[in-house]
Amino acid sequence: MARKTKRRHNHRKHRKSQNVETTVSDASLEDQLKEAPEEPEPQLIDKGDLRKEAQERAANRPIRERILSFFRRDDGQKDYKEIIINSEALERRVALLQNGVLDDFSVERKEEDRMVGAIFKGKVQNLEAGLKAAFVDIGQDKNAFLHYWDMLPGAGNNDPDLEIVRENKGKNSGRTEAKSIKDIPKVFPIGSEIVVQITKGPIGTKGPRTTTNLALAGRFLVLMPYGGQCGISRKIDDRTERNRLKRIITNLSLREGMGVIIRTVGESKPEKFFDRDLQLLLQQWDEIEAKMKTVRGPAYLYQEPDLIGLTARDFLTEDVDRVQVDKKEDYDRLIESVQKISPKSKSKINHFDEEIPIFERFSVERQIEQTFMRKVPLPSGGEIVIEETEALVSIDVNTGSHKVDRKDGKNFILQANIEAGVEVARQLRLRNLGGLVIIDFIDMKNKGDQRKVHQRMKASMADDKAKHNILPISQLGIMQITRQRHEESNTSGIYDDCHYCSGRGIVKSSRSVSIEIQRRIISAVRQVKTDDLARRDVKFKVYMHPSSLRRLRGPDASLIGLLERNYDITLTFEASESFHVENFKVIDELTDKEIR
């Protein structure tokens, strides 16, 4: 309690000092507000302190909870995992902490629909034979992309991470199906209705990607209403457990033509859990099927749960020790959801009702700040620099503030690269980065060191839920990673492209604009004199930004005078701060028309 009081006092003291500065220097404050805010230098967060705080919280839990946590874990792990849920007026945030360190982060904005996993009844808008794809109107801003391959039944059953253990073929329940890609234009002509599920949300200018092979995720099972095959994730590698799960799949009461997949979280769970999960999924499917028969497309049929529902279904696993929720309404909803899915987990959920914001109380806010910075410091003194582009994500590993000397140079380089690999794996999850990722490590000549970094990178990404592939370090010192991404990165949700530079991050110099203005004037002279051979009096007025005018009246003044003499023209200039720094207009004063 003393620590909490001290924090509040410091917060009030800091707020008071800010108010004093504002009243004392209003003029300087106004000047500062005209400039972009300064980005703070990235500070290394001591993970040792975070772990210490987490262990204190673990030790302060009720004794019954500590005993249950001890017996739940059969792998000897002593990591303390917490889920922190913060709800505000416009967004909801969920953070997963492992020993106090931010390990995963999700944001949900109240006005945005959760697209991935949503099921729509749409209309085929267009068929592109060259792309082998259909574009489907689902009632959203952008038409959905549907590859011909994803229109064939059972196309998603070729996942190499899945072992098929039971066939459950049957009637298609009246569903229209194409047997091969050649049949698709006949089976799904333009204007025909089709039911699709979004597998990848809209990213940039691209619309959502969809499939006709629907899947509904439960806590332990994934139901595929039209799948016809049942399988087990290959990530469950214990042979005895796999045999037990195969027997459970055989005993499940499935409807004809349906398929299921046992999720990795189902490992070691009793058979009754799978039966209960299946009944909930079948009930969900019945509701979707009823809508399919009654509504006309384009229309919403099903939407994935919000972050509260997903926390109950996907995040609140056996190895999670504690869940802290700061909004009573969300706490009640989470308890209600967990009661249906995993009643034993209710004791882990706690309503956080302290005055201090929950993300500050658990040191989450300052960790999140780093996920939007270009540079992330490493414990050894090195740093990684992350650049997200439309085509790929580039990550550069630098020595940073560390000065490599002859004695420890080699060891430091290996240490910095290993630290970078661990941090990159974490940042990819936190920022939701995907596609092609290129990492430029500090050069290592030793092949053994390169293998160590590669193995550490694979180990750090082993628990990443997104599918990924990691290639060894190349001869150029580059590591290539592909990582599946279903939605836009967290950065794109927080930031818009700069309206001034259109997202380039750079603007033309005044010298470049001056050169372009002079070229335009010369072109304008030729254009005017070509159109009117008899014209002698040529006057142009040039509108521009003041920085360009300063250039023309300063270093380039003699060139402007030369233009006027050589081409026998008169030039006048007008500048305004409201004009874009790169933009200018050349106006013919006689006709009052712009010369392009």
Image (tube, rainbow, N blue to C red):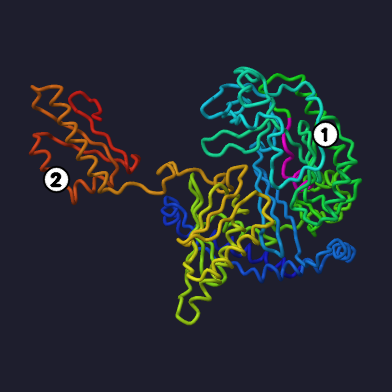
Residue that appears at 51% across and 54% down: 438
Q: What secondary structure is found at the residue carrying circle 1?
A: loop
Q: Is residue 155 visible?
A: yes
Judge by depth and name the residue closer to the eye, 148 or 190: 148
Residue that appears at 67% across and 20% down: 193
Judge by depth and name the residue closer to the eye, 369 or 189: 189
Kindly identify which residue carries mark 1.
168
Alpha carbons under labels 2 and 1: distance apart: 82 Å
Q: Determine the image quadrant of residue 159.
A: top right
Work out which residue is located at the far bottom of the displayed protein and give it.
Answer: 407
Spot occupied by residue 320 in the image (x, y as percentages of width and height): 78, 57
In this rendering, is residue 53 above or below 212?
below
Magenta: main secondary structure = helix
Q: Is residue 317 left or right of residue 419?
A: right
In this rendering, is residue 526 above or below 84?
above
Q: Is residue 299 visible?
A: no
Give amino acid for label 2. Answer: Leu
Q: Residues within 10 Å of mark 1 (few under 14, many from 20)?
A: some
Q: Which residues are magenta?
A: 302-314
Residue that appears at 63% across and 32% down: 149
Kindly identify which residue carries mark 2.
559
Q: What secondary structure is found at the residue carrying circle 2?
A: helix
In this rendering, is residue 94 above or below 596?
below
Q: Is residue 572 left or right of residue 319?
A: left
> Residue 305 lies in magenta, yes or no?
yes
Which callout, 2 or 1, points at the residue further toward the start of the chain?
1
Q: Determine the image quadrant of residue 140.
A: top right
Looking at the rendered image, the disc whose residue lies closer to the viewer, 2 or 1, is 1
Give amino acid for label 1. Answer: Asn
Task: Locate the C terminus by quadrant.
Answer: top left
